[in-house]
Amino acid sequence: MPELSEPRSTAAASGGALATTEPAASTGPAPAPEKQLESGPAPGKPRSLWSDAWHDLRRNPMFLVSAALILFLLVIVAFPGMFTSVNPRDGDLQNHFLQGPQFSHWFSPEWLGYDGQGRSIYTRIIYGTRASVIVGVTVTAIVLVTGTIFGLLAGYFGGWIDTLISRVTDIFFGIPFLLGAMVVLTTFEKRQVWVVVAALAFLGWTSITRVMRGSVITTKQSDYVTAAKALGAGTRRILTRHILPNAIAPVIVVAMINLGGYISAEATLSYLGIGLSDPTISWGIDVSSGKDALRVAPHVLLFPSLMLSFTILAFIMLGDAVRNALDPKLR
């Protein structure tokens, strides 16, 4: 029996060697795993909320159109002299009183006509962009920072801090926004840009605070926050590294949508004669002066109103696009 079993084991061993060496001789060398990884990102690699949002925004036509419009507005704000060389306060009543538009003269002082004081409407629209955009962006930045801080403190610590901030927020919510701004602005004789910004920011932080508070309350119950506390992370690190980056998304969406509302509020107050005042140039002031000549020269009111509407629409479209990108339920 040993003599019979020994050749079988030898044959099996030799056959196994042939089975293993034959495929190696017939096939080429296998590609290195490093080169396979260099061809692209590893499948299944997790992406963050912000990377997913940016990936969706780049393919959203609404975002691309609104971003292009806002970029164009920012260029006008920074360099108004690139678009016109005429002083927006210079008027010629003798030659240009309520003169109609000359659409053949594109991007010239005569393009959109003249107002009741002989001033170029096109030039005033260009220079009025600065006041409206600066007011909207500055108020949004102040409100975003203030509301984020208050909402973060109220949502994370709770207790008497939450009670105090919530009651103060309720008090400010009880004040009508435009009415409160009118009361504040009437106390100033000269209402420049910073005065209007202070009045709108003083009353506009409440919505951001409530949104941030609710987002923080939801985020602080997550497992990664509990794990950070168990590992001994301090309060500042937990707030800045774990809670704030994961709770700020809905706040940014609300702030961007409200930005158009602040521009509209500034124009409304200026139209009523309570917002920006001369010598500051504002679309609301031009719309207010154009209403008296609506029947004989409707272009005086039409073109500043259209520019105001397009600007507000651009920021609202941007806010909607960002909301759709940051909210997983809307994808």
Image (cartoon, rainbow, N blue to C red):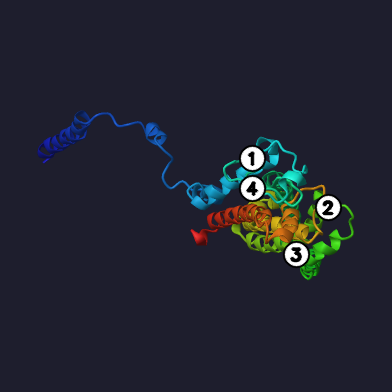
Q: Secondary structure at mark 3?
A: loop
Label 2 vs 1, first from the N-terminus: 1
Whether label 3 touches label 1, CB < 8 Å: no
Q: Say the numbered circle drawn on residue 258.
A: none
User: Along the horizontal axis of the image, is 162 left or right of 309?
Assistant: right
Type of the residue with mark 1:
Ser
The residue lying toward the viewer, choosing from 84 and 15, is 84
Whether label 3 touches label 2, CB < 8 Å: no
Q: Secondary structure at mark 1?
A: loop
Q: Say the numbered circle drawn on residue 112.
A: 4
Q: Which residue is mark 1?
A: 108
Q: Secondary structure at mark 2?
A: helix
**Is residue 249 depicted above or below 41 in this figure?**
below
Gap in Å between the C-alphas at discs 3 and 4?
A: 56 Å
Gap in Å between the C-alphas at discs 2 and 1?
A: 33 Å
Type of the residue with mark 4:
Leu
The residue lying toward the viewer, choosing from 191 and 209, is 191
- Residue appearing at x 39%, y 35% in the figure: 39
Gap in Å between the C-alphas at discs 3 and 2?
A: 34 Å
Gap in Å between the C-alphas at discs 2 and 4?
A: 31 Å
Q: The N terminus lies in which quarter of the figure? A: top left
Nearer to us of marks 3 and 4 is 4
Q: Which residue is mark 3?
A: 158
